[in-house]
Image (cartoon, helix red, strand yellow):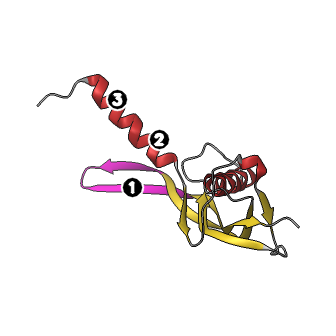
Amino acid sequence: MKIPFKQLTFVAAAFIVAGCNSASHVVVGTARPPRSPDQVKIYLTAPKRFEEIALLDASSKSSWAVSDQGKMDTAMRRLREEAAKLGANGVLLRGTGEQQAATVSTGSVTGTSRRSSATAFGTGVAVPINDKTATGVAIFVVEE
């Protein structure tokens, strides 16, 4: 069976887009209509009156961010976006962290040989690539 190039391209694009969603949630309360992520405030301590909506996890996975700060900004933006989808107006931040995403390795070998013997020398370098993570609770803060 031969798959047309257009269909193969569409399937590949769908997998790439699905892989870019690096945030998830577990609903523990009542979700509300979605809102803009700009309306979601990050709280380090619990406000006086709020309702829990969901537990959130987000990371900088599959982002183009290079610096640690850029990766953390991406994880926090994704946390806000996930909360906004559930109608939260706040996120009670539970923690941030790091997870190893990949390792970039390179190496080289040099060798010489003479009649019945050979000598080789090798070196290698491996550099870990890390993603930033953020966890929290999507909340709806009740204004007084």
Tag 3: amino acid: Thr
| Nearer-N-terminus badge (3/2) | 3
* Residue at left offset 60%, top offset 67%: 30
* Residue at left offset 32%, top offset 55%: 118
Image height of 109 relative to 136, above or below: above
Task: Say whether residue 4 is visible.
Answer: yes
Q: Report if residue 1 lies within the magenta region.
A: no
| Nearer-N-terminus badge (1/3) | 3
Q: Nearer the viewer, residue 40 or 128?
A: 40
Looking at the rendering, the stretch of residues picked out in magenta corresponds to 106-128
Q: Report if residue 120 lies within the magenta region.
A: yes
Determine whether, in the image, residue 121 is placed left or right of residue 21.
left
Tell me which corner region of the image, top left, top right, bottom left or bottom right, holds residue 32.
bottom right
Tell me which corner region of the image, top left, top right, bottom left or bottom right, holds residue 25.
bottom right
Q: Badges 1 and 2: C-beta atoms under 8 Å apart?
A: no
User: How far apart in space, not on screen, are marks 3 and 2 (Cα)?
Assistant: 12 Å
Q: Nearer the viewer, mark 1 or mark 3?
A: 3
User: How far apart in space, not on screen, are marks 1 and 2 (Cα)?
Assistant: 45 Å
Determine whether, in the image, residue 102 is placed left or right of residue 36.
left
Quadrant containing the C terminus is: bottom right
Q: Secondary structure at mark 2?
A: helix
Image height of 2 relative to 81, above or below: above
Tag 2: amino acid: Val
Tag 1: amino acid: Ala
Q: Secondary structure at mark 1?
A: strand
Q: Badges 1 and 3: C-beta atoms under 8 Å apart?
A: no
User: How far apart in space, not on screen, are marks 1 and 3 (Cα)?
Assistant: 45 Å
| Nearer-N-terminus badge (1/2) | 2
- Dot 2: within a 10 Å radius of its alpha carbon, few (fewer than 14), some, or many (20 or more) residues? few
Reading the image, the residue beneath label 2 is: 17
Disc marking residue 9: 3
Reading the image, the residue beneath label 1 is: 120
